[in-house]
Amino acid sequence: MECTVSWTGATGARSGMGFVAETGSGHVLVMDGAPDATQPANGGQNLAPRPMETVLAGTGGCTAYDVVLILKRGRHDVRGCTVKLTAERAPADPKVFTKIHLHFTVTGKAIPVGAVERAVALSHDKFCSATIMLASTAEITSSVDVREA
């Protein structure tokens, strides 16, 4: 797996802290920093997600992928899956994530809550590279809501 990240401020009229990532699969992801009113050249322009927001989004995508796949393999009639992630970061550099809560909302036909809880646990304990990696610095918790579709 590979990815190339390029600073967009190096060639633009305004410097700032924008970046474009090109993934090994040929996709592009734009990232930007938060504006800095005291030192505008050191801040972003708020044109895209922050890099750490993309880490959080990638984590949500990784675990949701697992949960849907596990439920489908269990022959459950999954119609939807969303994950809302809330995170806290350390106050000092390197400002790693210290707490991450993932709230899963799964919709489908007659899906037992226990099946969703098991899928989430399998994802976090065995399959999801992102949550397993982040668990080295963050307390990761989860909750589930199962809705009939």
Image (cartoon, helix red, strand yellow):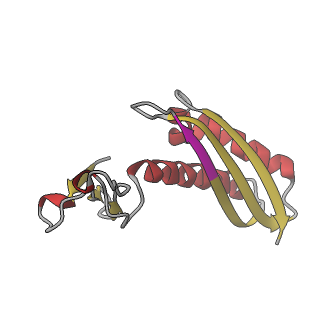
Name of the residue lying farthest toward the front = 38
Please say whether residue 32 is one of the residues in the magenta stretch. no
Q: Main secondary structure of the magenta part?
A: strand
Residue 113 x, y percent position in the rendering: 85, 51
What span is in magenta?
85-89
Instruction: From the viewer's perspective, tell me whether residue 116 is left or right of residue 30.
Output: right
Q: In front: 78, or 100?
A: 100
**Residue at the image point whose x is 31% and y is 51% from the top:** 38
- In front here: 149 or 87? 87
Name the residue rendered at 42%, 60% in the picture.
49
- Viewer-proximal residue among 27 and 75: 27
Report the side of 81 relative to 42 (left or right): right
How many numbered circles does the render carry? Answer: 0
* Residue at the bottom extreme of this rendering: 149
Q: Return the x and y of residue 3 as percentages of the image width and height.
A: 28, 51
Q: Residue at x 13, y 58 (%)?
A: 10
Relative to 111, is 120 above or below? Answer: above
Q: Position of residue 90 (x, y in %)?
A: 50, 32
Left or right of 100? Residue 109 is right
Residue that appears at 76% across and 46% down: 143
Residue 8: x, y in percent?
Answer: 20, 61
Q: Image quadrant for the C terminus?
A: bottom right
Based on the picture, tell me whether residue 87 belongs to the magenta stretch.
yes
